[in-house]
Amino acid sequence: MKSPGVPQPVLEALAGLKRDTPPVWLMRQAGRYLPEYRATREKAGGFLDLCFNPQLAAEVTLQPIRRFGFDAAILFSDILVVPYALGQAVRFEAGEGPRLDPLKDRADFFRLKDEIDQSLLAPVYETVERVKEELPSGIALLGFCGAPWTVATYMVAGHGTDDQRPARLFAYREPDTFAILIDRLIASSIAYLSRQLDAGADAVQIFDTWAGMLPPAEFDRWCIDPAKRIVAGVRAKHPGARIIAFPRGAGTALKRYAEAVRADGVGLDWMIDRAFARESVSAKTAVQGNLDPIVLLAGGAALDRGVDDVLAAFAGRPFIFNLGHGILPETPINHVEQMLRRIRGG
Ligand code: CP3
């Protein structure tokens, strides 16, 4: 399926090029809204078994490409494979989301490995290789990791929380210990993303899903500084690596984040004021986003209007169409098709 020289619109946007019709992919595009995903998931057994089965993980990575022809495939895995590779127990229980043995005190932190055990992550890199082999050459393959703050919120709490209270409390009470954890996650993320790039990922995204929960000083320390160091660290090993950073909920701190982190693309959530985002991110840097996932669920005239508003807001600059967060499992497939027709015309 390879034909060298075919342009990859997502990589072009990350290189600063604009197009009239932007490239498009969706966060969580491989997932439960697809019947073919649900069937493969059933075959795999547990969710982590699916993440660590290169053949099936490659299959679900490619499913949304075959069905919709998105401009990027995103590696099928999860951000919590990094804590797993640091020696923390991670489980996914049906209908309950992730469960980890929580890090309650200093002693728990010091039981973690100093570095990720790359042998545990070898199946993820094999997935990247397999997908790369099968992906049509105009379609970009994206790797990813969770940002240190977001990953730490799950490591400390042991599960998802509405307000990330356990991690925030820990960071206030024991900032030095928390900083050690964040430093370890920075080094782990650099090593993990570098191996994904070695295996054939064309670009990588850093997901900071819980960035929006921190006051300014903590946002700078636990979100901006780590993302900046990951971007610099990955580029030191892979000069020219294309990186997208997604600080969900950054609000007015988006400007500081974009200026400091210097990613090639900045992911926008659906809440941000689009005019503010346009002014806050340099016109040479791509923006990615930011349709409300609930508008995609709603469909109809609201969806058409929602797509048009996003397109109008980011016309004339490097832009990658996406949602403002992951696609919801209840989303009807024909709404995704409607969205694509609206973006691409026809
Ligand atoms: O298609 C893709 O985007 C690639 C795969 C991907 C998954 N998770 C698969 C997944 C990616 C990029 C992620 C990232 C991820 N994982 C994040 C950051 C982005 C975000 O959505 O906020 C976070 C916070 C996680 C942690 C996580 N994984 C949670 C909280 C949950 C449970 C919630 C849920 O949606 O069920 C997961 C499980 C998960 N990760 C599923 C998928 C497809 C659903 C599990 C299943 O199939 O049963």
Image (spheres, rainbow, N blue to C red):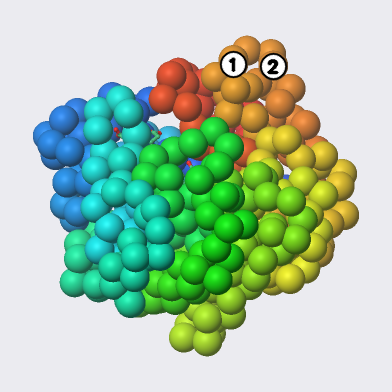
Query: Is mark 2 in CB contact (under 8 Å) with mark 1?
Result: yes
Indicate the position of residue 336 as horizontal and vertical percent values: 50, 27
Give the image quarter of residue 296: top right
Residue 245 seen in the current view = no
Estimate how packed mark 1 is, as few (under 14), some (14 to 19) or many (20 or more) residues with alpha carbons within 10 Å.
Answer: some
Q: What residue type is labelled 2?
A: Ala
Q: Name the residue under label 1.
A: 299
| Residue plotted at (39% across, 53% down) | 104
- Above or below 167: residue 335: above
Q: In this view, does 301 lie to the left or right of 200?
A: right
**Element type where label 1 sits in the image:** loop
Q: Which of 171 and 192 is in front in this view?
A: 171
**Quarter holding residue 113:** bottom left
Report the front residue among 136 and 140: 140
Q: Secondary structure under badge 2?
A: helix
Q: Is residue 97 above or below residue 330?
A: below
**29 on left or right of 313:** left
Q: Ligand 1 is found in which quarter of the picture?
A: top left
In the rendered image, residue 60, in percent from the top left (x then y), is placed at 28, 42
Residue occupying the point 52% across, 81% down:
233
In the image, residue 262 above or below residue 271? below
Please identify the quadrant where the N terminus is shown.
bottom left
For the residues labelled 2 and 1, the Cα–Cα distance comes to 6 Å
Q: Which residue is drawn at 48% across and 50% down?
A: 153
Q: List x then y, in percent, for residue 252.
A: 82, 49
Read off the residue under disc 2. Answer: 302
In which quadrant is the C terminus drawn?
A: top right
Amino acid type shown at disc 1: Gly
